Amino acid sequence: MSTPVIGVLALQGDVREHLVALAAADAVARPVRRPEELAEIDGLVIPGGESTTISKLAVLFGVMEPLRARVRDGMPVYGTCAGLIMLADKILDPRSGQETIGGIDMIVRRNAFGRQNESFEASVDVKGVPGDPVEGVFIRAPWVESVGAETEVLAEHEGHIVAVRQGNALATSFHPELTGDHRLHALFVEMVHASRAADSL
């Protein structure tokens, strides 16, 4: 099967690092800002950044509704940090006017691990990622307060859920794209391959 085309939502945040990580995981990676670009991809990464800003820019650029529609239709999507918040069906403490794309039955708490100056790295065992633990970079990171019956918990740190999957949607509280370890991006690329194979049946 041909190489999948995976977009990175390029409204705000660490877009370039995800593009590099996806390319290293054998995908064609491209930035996505507009609805017509969204229509041309097989999967999408929603990067870290500031979830309120990403939400408002997604509405402003006209991609919020098309994004929700594609996620509902099963397009594979992976959110890191702010991206995890964007994929949550519910935010415990939303900012005024903050919207999410949804797609994962979970409740998240923004900035749960503390402020910018409390950022840290930690080794995280992630279900589905073979080998050594993943080095997670936590920057003003959220955590998942609770999940629904359909949502699988992939990793916890200090008793808090930091990685989940529901169907074709994957999310982590931390930033794997900042470490040079591309195994989580490789897992996501596998999810995109599997989705394309299922669609072609």
Image (tube, rainbow, N blue to C red):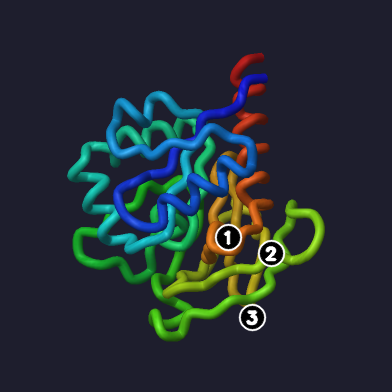
Lateral position of residue 176 relative to residue 126, left or right: left
Query: Which residue is rendered at x = 48% and y = 45% of the image?
Result: 19
Which comes before the other along the chain, label 1 or label 3?
3
Q: Which residue is mark 1?
A: 176
Query: Which residue is rendered at x = 45% and y = 65% of the image?
Result: 108
Q: Secondary structure at mark 3?
A: loop
Q: Which residue is mark 2?
A: 134
Query: Which residue is rendered at x = 41% and y = 85% of the image?
Result: 117
Circles 2, 1 touching at the beta carbon (< 8 Å): yes
**Depth check, front residue: 146 or 48:** 48
Crowding near pointer 3: few (<14 within 10 Å), some, many (20+)?
Answer: few
Q: Give the residue type at disc 2.
A: Val
Quadrant (top left/top right/bottom left/bottom right) for the C terminus = top right
Crowding near pointer 2: few (<14 within 10 Å), some, many (20+)?
Answer: some
- Find residue 75 and report its horizontal and vertical position in percent: 50, 33
In this rendering, the label closer to the viewer, 3 or 2: 2
Q: Secondary structure at mark 2?
A: strand
- Find residue 116 and report its horizontal and vertical position in percent: 39, 80
How far apart marks 1 and 3 lie (CA) works out to 18 Å
Quadrant (top left/top right/bottom left/bottom right) for the N terminus = top right
Q: Which residue reaches farthest top?
A: 201
Position above or below: 196 against 64:
above
Q: Give the residue type at disc 3.
A: Glu
Q: Which label sits on residue 158? A: 3
